[in-house]
Image (spheres, rainbow, N blue to C red):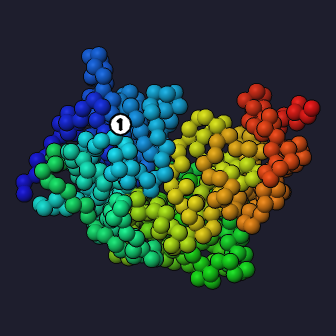
Amino acid sequence: MAFKYITAEEAASVIKNGDNVGFSGFTPAGSPKAVSVALAKRAEEEHAQGHPFKINIFTGASTGDSVDGVLTRADAVAFRAPYQTNGDMRKGLNAGKVEYADLHLSQMAQEIRYGFMGKRVNVAIIEACDITDDGKVYVTTGVGISPTIARMADAIIIELNAAQSKSIKGLHDIYEPADPPYRREIPIYKPSDRVGKDYIQIDLSKLVGIVETNKPDEARGFTAPDPVTDRIGLNVANFLAADMKAGCIPSTFLPLQSGVGNVANAVLGALGEDRDIPAFEMYTEVIQDSVIGLMKEGRIKFGSTCSLSVSNECLDEIYANMDFFHDKLLLRPSEISNNPEVVRRLGLITINTAIEADIYGHTNSTHISGSRMMNGIGGSGDFTRNAFISIFTCPSVAKDGKISSIVPMVSHVDHTEHDVNIVVTEQGVADLRGKSPLQRAQAIIENCAHPDYKQLLWDYLKLATKGHEPAHMPAALAMHAEFMRSGDMRNTNWAEYVK
């Protein structure tokens, strides 16, 4: 079949004000990089003429600046779901300029199918490394919700990216579950099980055209490890090694899920160095450079993921050594990589990062001071609720010690005490399993709080009203209020709350 090749500007002209537009990828990996830029320019031109022009963005997770950044700066986004990490997008949604739905990533594709996100997907924009005459689309480094938006969209635009090697073909496992009442189990019983195809089949009658690009992923960098992140990583590794020795974790270990960022890298590094922990597999949503390094060392045997969210240098290395990596990596849709059923069946050890945790184990992953969105819940809830062991990590303090990450009551709850098993800071580990609320509070204050805040938290616990989960409601958010007033939580004075 002779495909129609079009410019990014021609592709952008298909999209109308108010359209629901689905984007491929998961993190900047696999996200479109050309049509969205042209669309932002078109929005600016429409605005200059006094015409309204905004779209609703559906994605697998975050994207690169070429989607979230340029479209936000062009004031071209009315609604966004389910997760973002772009600074301009963050400012837009916190200023009320962009409506934002913070969803569990495993739910995004099915909520589109159920009609919860609107009646239809008007346009799907999908990055690919190859497309065949009969409509087989081979996506690149991030899958996200691509299978669902490709099937449901009225129109499809393919960005054929020459910067992505065709050697990645065969690395994907594309599977879209049935909807209720016909849903069956997803037959994944170990991380390496394949259940689908390595391509997305599209209806060629929907194909608007192909836009040729040659742009690498807009990979994000991370700061170098520091003593705090290193200590957190070591604390997690020591805890898991001890739990395995105690017989709580099988001697063969269990598959691991790890979030994204510096702390996650430090944890994986510590697990890789701890020879008491055997080589392990991963069933996760994002794979970073550290995982690839541990695969080369033989410490990680296999990685099932939704996204190769790695540096461009690391991706080049994967492409250059695909014979080695081909049977060690698998890329799935986010609906499968984050699927609660599969997470529970595999018995994952899950490790995610919190902004803050309170003394009873409730954690806040999303909002600063209770109201300002940081990034979103991402997949942490998908994994935490269904984990064999759920672990949350965070430094004990922030802002040069002016903020305690351990507080009497979190300012926003993403994960309740019922789902959080372990809290880890650089100070130590609080094992909350089998403990009452008061016992959890004692473990978290003693083991996880920074010395500057430990007595302050003990004093709050004495102040708290008796009950199953003691609380003093007027004082529960006093440390947050004190930071907003004086800029330092250490100035909190409980005497103000004593009658």
Residue 187 versus residue 96: which sits nearer the camera? 187
Q: Is residue 478 above or below residue 194?
A: above
| Rendered location of residue 465, percent (x, y) | 85, 44
* Residue depicted at 38% across the width and 32% down the height: 77
Residue 494 drawn at (x, y percent): 88, 36
Above/below status of 234 relative to 39: below
Q: Residue at x 30, y 41 (%)?
A: 119
Residue 60 relative to residue 50: left or right: right
* Direction top: furthest residue: 50
Front residue of 448 and 211: 448
How many marks can you see? 1
Above or below residue 11? Residue 359 is below
| Residue 155 in sight from this viewpoint | yes
**Quarter in which the N terminus is drawn:** bottom left
User: For the point 28% across and 35% down, which residue is it?
Assistant: 19
The spot of residue 301 in percent (x, y) is 49, 77
**Which quadrant is the C terminus positioned in?**
top right
Q: Quadrant of residue 407?
A: top right
Residue 414, given in percent of the width and then of the height, sits at: 60, 48
- Residue at the far bottom in the pictured view: 251
Residue 489: tell me if it is visible: no
Q: Nearer the viewer, residue 106 or 74?
A: 106
Is 10 left, or right, of 55 in this rendering?
Answer: left
Q: Residues within 10 Å of mark 1 (few under 14, many from 20)?
A: many
Callout 1 amino acid: Asn
- The residue to which callout 1 is attached is 56
Residue occupying the far left of the picture = 2
**Circle 1 sits in a helix, a strand or a loop, which is it?**
strand
Q: Quarter of the image holding residue 390?
A: bottom right
Location of residue 271 (image quadrant): bottom right
